[in-house]
């Protein structure tokens, strides 16, 4: 299952991403996590030092490797330069598993507390004033487009804050999107904006309350979110310790917050996998991007990259060079 965490900046989505990923890994489940936020803090939340995070090889800095590997022998993509962030897989493309050995993971993925972590990378000096952050996130979008997650495998993505994810089709790449809400008017505003933008794309969204101090906070969220509110996490000493640099084992998390994570996992495990929709939406947003800018930039029609006969999912793995789903 592919899972996204979104919400207002400062709502705690990175913290919840890390807690959720660590709780999954603690059960022995394979977990691949992406830090796709402009503020790259997921590694620290998982337990890396600032210095270790700074040494993480960014996906955005390895686009030639990523494109060349994923292109494989797809005849619709003559070279890696022809690929853009929305290029969907087709016959001959290389598909990825959540956990496997491949050149991309070898170069860009590191294990932290049982979680395999990749980062899109921060802005660099050469980016300032000339690039938007979506150029970095494009690497993650390409990987997600080509990734086949099997039963019991989890891909957790800490997304950019607010509605920035809607600048591409990235917001459709997930089986479940957890929208993290603080008990504040501003946080509820972001929640409503996200729902408005996503309503026409069959995006499964579950709201999760965070930083709950008392019954007033819970009542506020219940009133504002209604049945969309799945569960709440209370103000946590465990999290506060982590923010001071003391990363405790996930087993030390408070019982009520552990129960909230379990409720979230139950929603994820109960979600229905729809590979046909996943590929259909990938094609839809690729055609939008091709018409809006990508074909002009490439100098030829990138709608030709769409393979109408390609069927995404586990059945395609034996023909892609990736390991089959067991």
Image (spheres, rainbow, N blue to C red):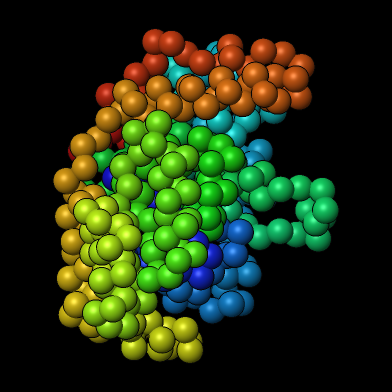
User: Which percent across, then down, holds residue 233?
Assistant: 28, 73
Say if 283 sits above or below 134 in the image.
above
Residue lying farthest to the front in this orientation: 223
Q: Nearer the viewer, residue 215 or 122?
A: 215
* Residue 19 shows up from this direction: no
Q: Quadrant of the N terminus?
A: top left
Residue 163 is at least partly visible in this image: yes
In percent of width and height, residue 3 lies at 35, 50
Quadrant of the snapshot with the C terminus? top left
Q: Is residue 177 above or below residue 42?
A: above
- Along the viewing direction, whichever of 95 and 87 lies nearer the viewer: 87
How many numbered discs, if any?
0
Task: Tell me where residue 244 appears, x and y as whole percent.
Answer: 48, 89
Point out residue 105 in the picture as x, y percentages from the top left corner: 48, 49
Residue in the image at 66% along x and 50% along y: 133
Left or right of 74? Residue 61 is right
Q: Residue at x 32, y 60 (%)?
A: 224
Q: Residue at x 43, y 26 (%)?
A: 281
Seen in the image, is 125 located left or right of residue 9?
right
Horizontally, residue 53 falls left or right of residue 231, namely right
> Image quarter for residue 279?
top left
- Which residue is at a point 42% across and 51% down the rendered structure image? 192
């Amino acid at each position: 299952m592919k899972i996204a965490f979104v919400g207002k900046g400062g709502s705690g989505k990175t913290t919840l991403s890390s807690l959720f990923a660590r709780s999954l890994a603690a059960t022995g489940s394979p977990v691949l996590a992406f830090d796709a936020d402009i503020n790259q803090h997921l590694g620290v939340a998982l337990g890396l030092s600032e210095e270790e995070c700074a040494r993480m090889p960014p996906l955005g800095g390895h686009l030639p490797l990523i494109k060349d590997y994923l292109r494989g022998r797809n005849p619709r993509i003559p070279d890696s330069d022809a690929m853009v962030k929305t290029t969907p897989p087709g016959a001959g493309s290389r598909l990825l598993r959540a956990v496997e050995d491949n050149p991309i993971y070898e170069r860009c993925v590191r294990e932290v507390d049982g979680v395999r972590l990749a980062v899109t990378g921060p802005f660099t000096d050469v980016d300032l004033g000339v690039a938007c952050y979506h150029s970095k996130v494009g690497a993650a979008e390409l990987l997600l487009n080509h990734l086949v997650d099997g039963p019991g495998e989890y891909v957790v993505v800490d997304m950019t804050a607010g509605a920035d994810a809607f600048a591409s089709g990235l917001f459709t790449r997930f089986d479940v999107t957890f929208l993290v809400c603080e008990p504040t008017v501003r946080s509820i505003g972001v929640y409503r904006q996200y729902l408005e933008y996503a309503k026409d794309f069959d995006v499964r969204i579950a709201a999760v309350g965070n930083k709950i101090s008392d019954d007033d906070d819970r009542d506020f969220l219940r009133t504002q979110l209604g049945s969309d509110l799945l569960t709440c996490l209370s103000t946590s000493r465990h999290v506060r310790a982590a923010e001071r640099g003391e990363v405790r084992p996930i087993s030390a998390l408070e019982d009520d917050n552990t129960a909230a994570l379990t409720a979230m996992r139950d929603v994820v495990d109960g979600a229905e996998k729809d590979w046909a929709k996943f590929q259909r939406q990938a094609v839809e947003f690729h055609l939008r991007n091709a018409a809006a800018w990508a074909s002009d930039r490439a100098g030829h029609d990138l709608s030709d990259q769409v393979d109408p006969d390609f069927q995404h999912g586990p059945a395609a793995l034996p023909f892609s060079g990736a390991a089959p789903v067991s």
